[in-house]
Image (cartoon, grey):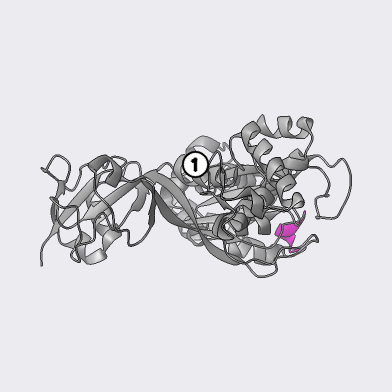
Amino acid sequence: MKIGLVGKPNAGKSTFFTAATSAEAQIGDYPFTTIDKNVGIAYVRKPCPSKELGIESNPNNSLSVDGIRYIPVELIDVAGLVPGAHEGKGMGNKFLDDLRQADVLIQVVDSSGKTDLEGNSTENAIPLEEVHFLENELHQWIGEIIIRTWSRSARAIEAGEKIEDFLSERLAGLKISREHVTLSLRKAAISKPVMKWTLEEGIILAKTLQKLAKPIVIAANKADISSEENLDSLTQISAIITAADYELALKNASKAGLISYNSGDSNFNLSDSKKLNEGQQNAIQKIEDFIKLHGSTGVQKCIENAVLDKLDLIAVYPVEDETHYTDGQGRVLPDAFLLPKDATAVDLAYKVHTDIGDSFIRAIDCRSKRVIGKDYNLQDGDIIKIVAGS
């Protein structure tokens, strides 16, 4: 599971990345702070079955805190994108190449309007323009890949090769599936004969492909210094109000033992207000006021919206002992896997290990102890035992 963190330079992506992953990324107030991509682990939250079952879990591939399971996902922060990136401007070629394997994108937008599209300081920039320019760059990029050497490529299609097969193979490196291609062709409904396609048709198809294969969550970042007008314009396109610098401050304060805070919480508790100097107290008060107004800093909400809503994933817990909910080493509810909503029991088996999928016999719903077949549709929160042949 890979989330691509995208946006223009100096929009706060590196701060967002560090806040989301607690990893160390270079943070600076100038364009192209990030030259090489940063890769870290963020988490999505799901209820841990341990609380419901009245048992204590021993997580292996994830974390469990106060009845909440934190499931890891990979977050990639790449160099800032500038207009003309698809033509190689700025760090464009590297940026786009780094995004090939992303399943979903989070675009960090500077909602304050204090930087232009190239990340330089300015006044009264329009944040919505960031949204549109990034979409345009992605559509140009995908469209040009579709239409590359098209006159020669189209002859193969005219000769009988299915266009779904041809495009699926061409776009496989972008993590675009045959299903994505088939649905996009149907939705785009391009009437022009294939032999006469140009970049215009490539971009029409690219727009639909991007929404299916690289959906975007908009983070209206720097909301703590933004105008209400800017935030209103972004929330109208379902952007999530975000203050990555506040999230990072809370994480650092928590590490220092000054507060008690978990990612995405709607509040935090001071450990000892006497430990804070006047400046820290003022900063904490600003963050507290922001969270009361907006519900959170928005960083965790962006991660979960990307994974759980845009990709529509569920959490499933595989075990070996259906009575004690343990694995072979006696660990209780050790693993949590994220799977598509329409995933089956055999899909879970393959997620655990290819050999287990290949030798799948049956599965057991551990709550009901009911035997289920390979075509059973998994439900969010299921605890499943896979029975496989030797």
The residue positioned farthest toward the bottom in the image shown: 36
Q: Where, quadrant-wise, is the N terminus in this rendering? A: bottom left
Placement of the C terminus among the 4 image quadrants: bottom left
User: Amino acid type of disc 1?
Assistant: Lys
Query: Going by the image, does 266 lie left or right of 95?
Result: left
Residue drawn at x 28%, y 47% as measured from the top left: 50
Residue 380 placed where, x, y %?
32, 41
Say whether residue 19 is visible: no
Spot occupied by residue 284 in the image (x, y as percentages of width and height): 68, 46
The percent position of residue 383, horizontal first and vertical second, equals: 23, 47
Relative to 181, residue 236 above or below = above
Is 32 placed left or right of 265 in the picture?
right
Kindly identify the residue that appears in the image at 21 percent across and 49 percent down: 384
> For the magenta stretch, what is the residue range?
83-88
Q: Does the magenta stretch include residue 154?
A: no
Q: Is residue 195 above or below residue 191?
A: below
Front residue of this view, candidates 32 and 257: 257
Task: Locate residue 380 relative to residue 96 in the image: left or right.
Answer: left
Q: Residue at x 83, y 49 (%)?
A: 116
Residue extending farthest to the front is: 274
| Magenta span contains residue 87 | yes
**Helix, strand or loop for disc 1:** helix
